[in-house]
Image (cartoon, helix red, strand yellow):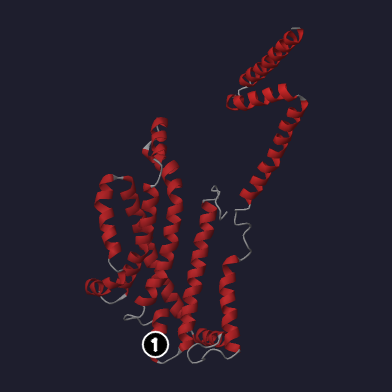
Amino acid sequence: MSAMTTSIPSATSTAASAATAVSEDGENGRSDETGETGEISKTAGATGTAGAAGAAGAAGAAAPARRTGRRRRGGLSPGKRLPASRLIGPVLFLALWAGASAAGQLDTNAIPAPWTVLRTAGQLWSDGTLSTDILTSLQRAGSGFALGLTAGVVLALTAGLSRVGEALIDGTVQLNRAIPTLGLIPLFILWLGIGETFKIAIIAIVVYIPIYLNLYSALSGIDHRFVELAEVQGLSKLRFIREIVIPGALPGFFVGLRLGVTGSWLGLVVLEQINATSGLGYMMFQAQNYGQTDVILVGLLIYGIFGLVSDSAVRLIERRVLSWRRTLNS
């Protein structure tokens, strides 16, 4: 009888200890761990120090697992940027080209060696022909790009910030996008003549379409909660555009700008072969008539250099303007 009396208070004290531990944990704000704490308390009451040591060992094993998870998440990053990484591909291509030419694996009549192309470029430059053609091409591409950039930005802002502007502009631009731009050349020649005007107009169309599409998409993709926040804060229309719309749309704008810069060079190489007397495209067209492959490659390399330099310039401006962003690329 005395043994039963002794065991009953012992069990009662054990249950009371478990209830006290559960209530203390609940007061500390760990309600989600109450069940787990109760189980640990019951185990500790039943098994003594061995149960507490087991719980401590489990908690100690959880910390290295969390640290391992952090290391694994950090390993998903692309890593540090390689120095002059955008030049590695072109340099490797030139090295393969030079190696194949030196080994006699390429037909020199079809694909001249790199040193032959460089020698031809030097001769054209010393004659004054190449410098004149480059200057003419830069003027055409620059004029068309400026017009296309202005038109793309104005139309995108009008369509992206106004329902009326969207109804009037977006459908027309999408229709223009579906029509091949180079297919408009005969019509523009009839409208504007066969001089410089139609060339600049075609380049402007090639440029404004990607700028409009990406900027309009960025404007439409701004979270509506920012609009509600601006209304609660009582921002004016001008402050709303300056502080919310422009920062939110800049990433899309720079994507369109890069595509527009590339498009200006792509359109130029075709347009300069139509009733032109100077320019890189005209030089390449004349070289085709005389079978001068090295001159054609000179023009293509210059186009490629211009495209790479202009794209790198836009990327540099983008990194400076959007330095506040934390992305994989940064």
Q: Position of residue 166 (x, y in %)?
A: 28, 49
Query: As rendered, which of 23 and 155 lies closer to the eye?
Result: 23
Q: Position of residue 185 (x, y in %)?
A: 28, 73
Residue wearing tag 1: 286
> Residue drawn 36% across and 77% down?
270
Q: Which quarter of the figure has residue 18?
A: top right
Q: Is residue 219 left or right of residue 33?
A: left
> Residue drawn 40% across and 43% down?
241
Q: Position of residue 285 (x, y in %)?
A: 38, 85
Q: Position of residue 243 (x, y in %)?
A: 45, 41
Q: Decide: few, some or many residues near mark 1? Use Cα within 10 Å; few <14, some 14-19, many ≥20.
A: some
Q: Is residue 23 visible?
A: yes
Q: Circle 1 sits in a helix, a strand or a loop, which is it?
A: helix
Q: Is residue 103 above or below residue 238?
A: below
Three-letter amino acid code at the position of disc 1: Gln
Q: Quadrant of the N terminus?
A: top right
The number of numbered badges drawn on the structure is 1
Q: Quadrant of the C terminus?
A: bottom right
Q: Which quarter of the figure has residue 40?
A: top right
Q: Is residue 279 visible?
A: no
Q: Which quarter of the figure has residue 23?
A: top right
> Residue drawn 24% across and 52% down?
168
> Residue drawn 64% across and 23% down?
38
Q: Is residue 127 above or below residue 56?
A: below
